[in-house]
Image (cartoon, grey):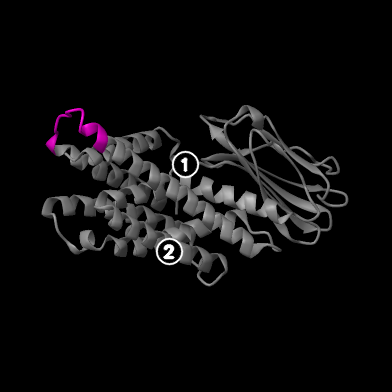
Amino acid sequence: MHPGFRCLLLLTILVVGTIGNMNPAFGHALQPGYLELQLVEKELYEVIWKTPAVGERPMAITARLPENCETRFPAPAIFDGSAYISRWSTKCAGGLEGGVIQIDGLQKTATDVLVRFELTDGSSEARRLTPNSPSLLVPAQPSPFEVVQTYLLLGIDHILFGVDHLLFVLALLLLVQGLRSVITTITAFTLAHSLTLIAATLGFVHTPVPPTEVVIALSIAFVAAEVVNNHRRDHGLERRYPWRIAFAFGLLHGLGFAGALADIGLPQNSIPTALLFFNIGIEAGQLLFVTSVLACVFLFQRMSLRIKLPTVEWAWAVPPYAIGSLAIYWVIERMAAF
């Protein structure tokens, strides 16, 4: 077995094993907390607060609205199978501008909270709160830097915690051989999902989210099957031109990214900037993952020159079968959720 393949084998076991220990609701991505304040009419807001589940209980965090809001704390929550949801209405005299939104207890966790809110002029904004920064002062008008920082980090988070997208990329790396082929394939995937992300976000393409998520899972299973087929026959069009698979399925993955961005929302006054830097964040996270995999392969190749590792004939099959099995599980789970 090639020493570089040993590294991919270990990475696959690590990633799949980690996913296997997660809550099934996190099949697509680790979900942060979520707070939304939607302006219904002058000074009246509809509030949604989603608390991540930890085991069978809600995480010990709670949203606190600005002091000028009549009802500052969440209503009783209802468990929806993946998180605890609270919904209530409140009046905030003068709007949210100048008020402080805080997530109590966030500094004691390792999660993030996405806050989406509407200003009195009807424009929407989004902010990412972290354990090191659990509160925000609602600005009258966000600065360009705040938009860039927020959506860049959201893009990085989405790809690095989007385990289905990462497994697809890992399966592509198992399919290709040679640095040139890796660059061509990843570039094709990047170009494709960037096109559909932009098209869907700007309203040129409309696709329902649940079927898209099913097809994304199927794309992972397909590439895993191609890894097996190409190993057995050691030739084939897909192995010679893997960029075609990457491009075709990249279009689908871009629709998945667009669905996540739709949940977050875009600031009305900075749509191009937010969209651009969300996509840049996705590319940065993907590049970090691919670079880490290639660095691992390189290190294992160097180590193999010094250490004689035993050869296991069937070990090559572990990564594609593990990835494919998890992908089929996601297909069934997501179809059942229709």
Element on which disc 1 rests: helix
Quadrant showing the N terminus? top left
Residue 124, x across and y down, in percent:
71, 57
- Magenta span main SS: loop
Q: Is residue 29 left or right of residue 19?
A: right
Whether residue 243 is visible: yes
Looking at the image, which residue is at 47% across and 57% down?
256
Q: Is residue 308 magenta?
A: yes
What label does residue 25 carry, if any? 1
In depth, the one of 254 and 306 nearer the eye is 306
Residue 103, image quadrant: top right
Q: Point out the tag, 1 or 2, that comes first from the N-terminus.
A: 1
Q: Is residue 107 left or right of residue 81?
A: right
Residue mark closest to the camera, 1 vs 2 = 2
The local crowd at label 2, few if under 14, some if 14 to 19, many if 20 or more residues have their Cα within 10 Å, is some
Q: Which residue is mark 2?
A: 191
Name which residue type carries label 1: Ala
Q: Is 54 placed above or below 95 here?
A: above
Quadrant showing the C terminus? bottom left
Report the number of discs: 2
Gap between marks 1 and 2, in whole Å? 29 Å
Residue 48, x across and y down, in percent:
67, 46
Residue 159, x across and y down, in percent:
47, 48
What label does residue 279 carry, if any? none
**What's drawn in magenta, residue-wise?**
301-313
Whether residue 12 is visible: no
